[in-house]
Image (tube, helix red, strand yellow):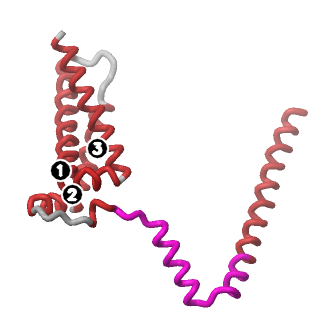
């Protein structure tokens, strides 16, 4: 009985503390906005909002530096297109499904089919990497954080293909 009461007191204390902290945060926000409105004019307030927006937005270097080569311009349009994004997201989900379809004691032909499908998706990701690196250039490609992650995944996938082919040969 004592343990039960102690737990309820602990939970009640946390809830009360959360209530007090929430109240103080709301009051602080009210005082802060009231004080700010008395100091800044409406134009200054708009300027502050625009500056905050500029700071929050990340400039995508590679997408705004238009290449001079016509082939690279074409590839940049392809990379920026919604169809390309949707097709690559579909490949990611398809690869997830294929990787999730393995199970213990699966037949050899089933495992071979899954490996071949995984190889097809890996080739799609390598092609995506090549198209993006040509379209954006190396500096533009590696400026975007998701591309760094994609590069890591493509590099590890290539390493996996090399190791698997080496192990099957020996």
Q: Earlier in the sequence, mark 3 or mark 1?
A: 3
The quarter holding residue 143 reads bottom left
The quarter holding residue 96 reads top left
Foreground residue, 27 or 117? 27
Mark number displayed over residue 79: 2
SS label for mark 2: helix
Q: Earlier in the sequence, mark 2 or mark 1?
A: 2
SS label for mark 3: helix
Which residue: 90% across, 33% down? Answer: 2
In the image, is 108 to the left or to the right of 21? left
SS label for mark 1: helix
Q: Say if the magenta span includes residue 1.
A: no
Mark number displayed over residue 131: 1
Label 3 with label 1: CB-CB less than 8 Å: no
Position of residue 16 relative to residue 29, above or below, is above
Depth check, mark 2 against mark 3: the one in front is 2
Mark 3 surroundings: few (<14), some (14-19) or many (≥20) residues within 10 A: some
Range of the magenta residues?
A: 32-60
| Helix, strand or loop: magenta stretch | helix
Instruction: Please provide percent x and percent y for residue 63.
Output: 27, 63
Instruction: Please provide percent x and percent y for residue 127.
Output: 17, 44
Position of residue 130 relative to residue 61, above or below, is above
Q: Where does label 3 land, which residue?
A: 92
Instruction: Please provide percent x and percent y for residue 95.
Output: 27, 38
Which residue: 35% across, 54% down? Answer: 144
Cα distance, mark 2 to mark 1?
A: 8 Å
Q: Earlier in the sequence, mark 2 or mark 3?
A: 2
Cα distance, mark 3 to mark 1?
A: 17 Å
In the image, is 145 to the left or to the right of 74? right
Label 2 with label 1: CB-CB less than 8 Å: yes
Q: Which residue lies most toward the left here?
A: 70
């Amino acid at each position: 009985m004592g343990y039960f009461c102690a737990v309820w007191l602990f939970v009640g204390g946390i809830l009360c503390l959360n209530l007090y902290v929430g109240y103080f945060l709301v009051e602080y926000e009210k005082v802060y906005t009231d004080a700010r409105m008395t100091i800044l004019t409406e134009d200054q307030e708009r300027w502050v909002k625009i500056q905050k927006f500029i700071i929050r937005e990340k400039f995508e270097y590679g997408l705004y530096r238009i290449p001079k080569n016509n082939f690279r311009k074409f590839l940049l349009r392809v990379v920026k297109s919604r169809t390309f994004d949707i097709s690559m997201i579909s490949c990611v989900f398809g690869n997830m499904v294929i990787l999730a379809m393995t199970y213990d004691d699966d037949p050899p032909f089933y495992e071979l089919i899954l490996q071949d499908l995984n190889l097809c998706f890996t080739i799609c990701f390598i092609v995506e990497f090549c198209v993006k690196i040509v379209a954006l250039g190396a500096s533009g490609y590696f400026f975007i954080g998701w591309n760094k992650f994609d590069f890591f995944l493509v590099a590890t996938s290539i390493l996996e293909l090399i190791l698997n082919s080496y192990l099957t040969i020996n």
